Image: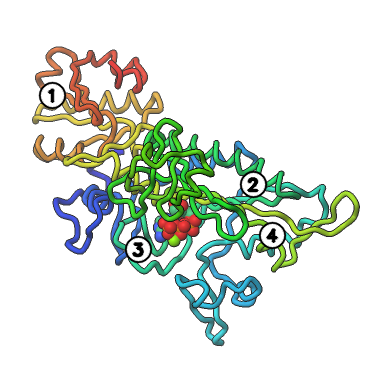
Amino acid sequence: MRQSELFTKTRKEAPKDEVSLNAQLLIKGGFIHKEMAGVYSYLPLGLRVLNKIIGVIREEMNAIGGQEVFLSSLQSKALWEKTDRWNDEKVDNWFKTKLNNDTELGLGFTHEEPLTAILTEHISSYRDLPKYIYQIQTKFRNEARAKSGVMRAREFLMKDLYSFSKSEEERKEFYDIVADAYHKIFSRVGIGEKTYMTFASGGVFSKYSHEFQTECEAGEDIIYVDEKKNIAVNKEVLTDEVLSDLGLKKDELVEKKAVEVGNIFNLGARFSESLGLTFKDEKGESRPVIMGSYGIGPGRLLGTVVESLSDDKGIIWPELIAPFQAHILFIGDSLDVRKEAERVVNELEKKGVEVLYDDRDVSAGEKFADSDLIGIPIRILISEKTLLQKKAELKSRKTNEIKLVDIESVLSKDLDVLLKL
Ligand code: ATP
Ligand code: MG
């Protein structure tokens, strides 16, 4: 991708009303556009990152047997009345709208109801179970406070997975499999070390649910971490009883601010009973399907990465989700230098490397500042000085380390090798 062709431009200042660091950096870098409080559009750079995050999540969901669907956002009032979740006193974040004939509709804030209803048409026997069904789809929530940028949006993507099992044991088995998959996802996108499986309130069906909380100054939650055991307890459930239940000691826990990037829940028969999702067991007896739900917010994850991995110059993307793998810059007016930069771009692209090429006629200072702001892991610079030695200057965005490397060896090595040179 030639930077001169990218329609987005970087900007020096974020909108004055934008208080969150993640949205400030993402807007300055041209990754997103702020439509209004809590509502953001993804632009080419932002969409590339978002799609990479989604790709990781999708791979891990497919690996544990998830089947992907895409449910509608428009939701029927009658369906949600059956589970008593239509009433605004029960659910305080609905966005509702109306057809021309005044029929009320809702914009889905979660999808237990419609998916459970769909499954009543497909599940009837113990032979049909278990099933694991997920989607990556837009949710609408009239969030009271939307001050955390893309981490708390009013329109946002969620990966929501639902499990449908014959028994509580079968549900629990899958729950543990999802927990492992979640650990994999958070490590692959680069926040594994800062993310803790956290005991949280379980609602009516279980003693606990589990949140995946990432240490982050901008987080809205407080967690207490046992760093040796690598688990945490949400402040909301921290009592002496819970501590003894989990075998934790208060004075061995470290308090941290954190953001919930994912969670996993036991739903028991709450939705299957209200909506008539039953199956015939081996003895021919009718029983409700036992459900679980498992969420991750790809946009919140993206915002969390920005919050926890940026510095005063800009974003520092982890390699796997960076919008591009290498940022190629040249400085000076020499035609030879530009030609050599273009050759490097073409050769790397031929090898399948995703390259952003700064071919703009702007000052070196501007190129460097934008490169730091956009945060691609490796910057490859060619100047008259480096070209004289047939070398390029490599800079790691993460460590700021700079090295002069033979251009031919840049072209012959894998990028992750170059990062470690
Ligand atoms: P929170 O307590 O932060 O409001 P929640 O308990 O409402 O989260 P869920 O309904 O379980 O969250 O949603 C599943 C996942 O979707 C969350 O773990 C989070 O990653 C993401 N998510 C929830 N609300 C938002 C939001 N407003 N903006 C972006 N992502 C969100
Ligand atoms: Mg919420």
- Residue 276 position (above or below residue 323): below
Please, what is the three-letter code of the amino acid marked with disc 3? Val
* Number of the front mark, 2 or 4: 4
Residue 300, x across and y down, in percent: 39, 51
Quarter holding residue 319 = top left
Please, what is the three-letter code of the amino acid marked with disc 1? Ser
- Residue 6 position (above or below residue 76): above
* Point 39% across, 42% down: residue: 250
Q: Which residue is mark 2?
A: 67
Measured in 3D between alpha carbons, the distance from the residue under mark 2 to the one under mark 4, in whole angstroms, is 21 Å
User: Which numbered disc, 2 or 4, marks the residue that appears first in the sequence?
Assistant: 2
Q: Which residue is mark 4?
A: 269
Q: Nearer the viewer, residue 349 or 421?
A: 421
- Residue 349 position (above or below residue 207): above
Whether tag 3 and tag 2 are in contact, CB under 8 A, the answer is no
Please, what is the three-letter code of the amino acid marked with disc 4? Ala
Q: Where's ligand 1: which quadrant? A: bottom left
> Dot 4 surroundings within 10 Å: few (below 14), some, or many (20 or more)?
many
Residue 198, x across and y down, in percent: 46, 45
Query: Disc 3 on helix, strand or loop?
Result: strand
Q: Which residue is mark 3?
A: 39
User: Which numbered disc, 1 or 3, marks the residue that appears first in the sequence?
Assistant: 3
* Number of the front mark, 4 or 1: 4
Whether tag 1 and tag 3 are in contact, CB under 8 A, the answer is no
* Number of the front mark, 4 or 3: 4
Q: Is residue 111 visible?
A: yes
